[in-house]
Image: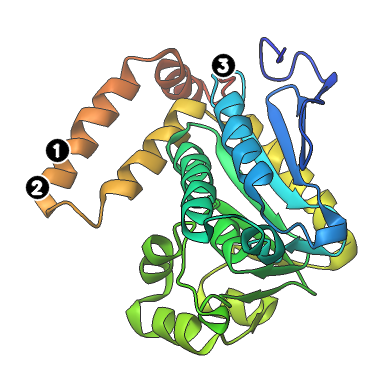
Amino acid sequence: MAVAPCAGRDVTVRSVTDFQTITLDQSGPIARLTLNRPEAANGMNDTMTRELAVAAARCDTPATKVVVITGAGRFFCAGGDLKDFASAPSRGRHLKGVADDLHRAISTFARMDAVVITAVNGVAAGAGFSLAVSGDLILAAESASFTMAYTRVGLSPDGSASYYLPRLIGIAKTKELMLTNRTLSSDDAAQWGLVTEVVADDQLAARADALADQMSTTSAGSNGGVKALLLDTFSNGLEQQMELEGRLIAQRAETADGREGVDAFLAKRKPVFGT
């Protein structure tokens, strides 16, 4: 996939068309990924999770500084496609493959330098909920809703939910969501600390674009450093985490972006960060 050589210099939109269940458009340093099975509530089947993993890998390049993930139609994602799972000769083996592909995608999004913005345009259930809250910045339309839904069909959570939810809202509230399948409105989700911002339905796309434009002018390496530090923070002790902080800030100081940021601050001008 051809991508822009430098942020801000090429706004030509390039679409990757070799996907069946998602779309991926690149505009300069911003990639826009849309779950595109509106007739199936953007349910995740084996094709979609495999394509998500491929798309995530394609976005994991220095030329991409922001990834926006949303859904086509009225749903963000209603979770796994149960019809697809039920038709498999071995449901367990099939579902493990689907989960593995989804997990590879989420891991790539979590560890790439690019800021991942999820724009939750409607219902986010099951794996859709998991994907939604795995974003770095999470926008929710006023009409959006969030529910785990796994135990309702005799299954258990996947898609990183058991990792991110306890860190975002604590064990007690996570158990409530997973065991009772309580549905949260977008306002509920904001009050619980699950989303960054609630936006009017007709303003969601514009707000996501504005936030993506804002983040595209920042330093990708610096953003990646923030993501890496926060991924480790709950598994490290104080001294280990501070050692990582010290090593990383020293590394950043030697980069072109690190030098540009400090020099621009001293010169009282706006920094121009590279890709």
Q: Which mark is residue 257?
A: none
Can you say which quadrant of the picture contains the N terminus? top right
In the image, is 47 to the left or to the right of 238?
Answer: right
Q: Residues within 10 Å of mark 3 (few under 14, many from 20)?
A: many
Q: Residue furthest left?
A: 239
On the image, the x and y values in percent for residue 78 come to 70, 66
**Scheme of colours in the image:** rainbow
- Residue at the location (58% across, 43% down)? 116
- Residue at the location (34% across, 49% down)? 230
Nearest the viewer among 249 and 227 is 227
Q: Looking at the picture, does residue 168 appear above or below residue 139?
A: below
Residue holding disc 2: 239
Q: Looking at the picture, does residue 226 appear above or below residue 71?
A: above
Give the CA separation, mark 1 to mark 3. 27 Å
Nearest the viewer among 78 and 131 is 78
Q: Residue furthest front?
A: 89
Q: Residues within 10 Å of mark 1 (few under 14, many from 20)?
A: few
Q: Mark 3 belongs to which amino acid?
A: Gly
Q: Mark 2 belongs to which amino acid?
A: Glu
Q: Are marks 2 and 1 in contact (CB under 8 Å)?
A: yes
Q: Looking at the picture, does residue 49 appear above or below residue 132?
A: above
Residue 65 seen in the figure: no
Give the CA separation, mark 2 to mark 1. 6 Å
On the image, the x and y values in percent for residue 115 come to 56, 39
Residue 109 seen in the figure: yes
Q: Residues within 10 Å of mark 2 (few under 14, many from 20)?
A: few
Which quadrant of the structure image shows residue 179? Answer: bottom left
Q: Mark 1 belongs to which amino acid?
A: Glu
Q: For numbered disc 2, what is the local secondary structure?
A: helix
Residue holding disc 1: 243
Residue holding disc 3: 274
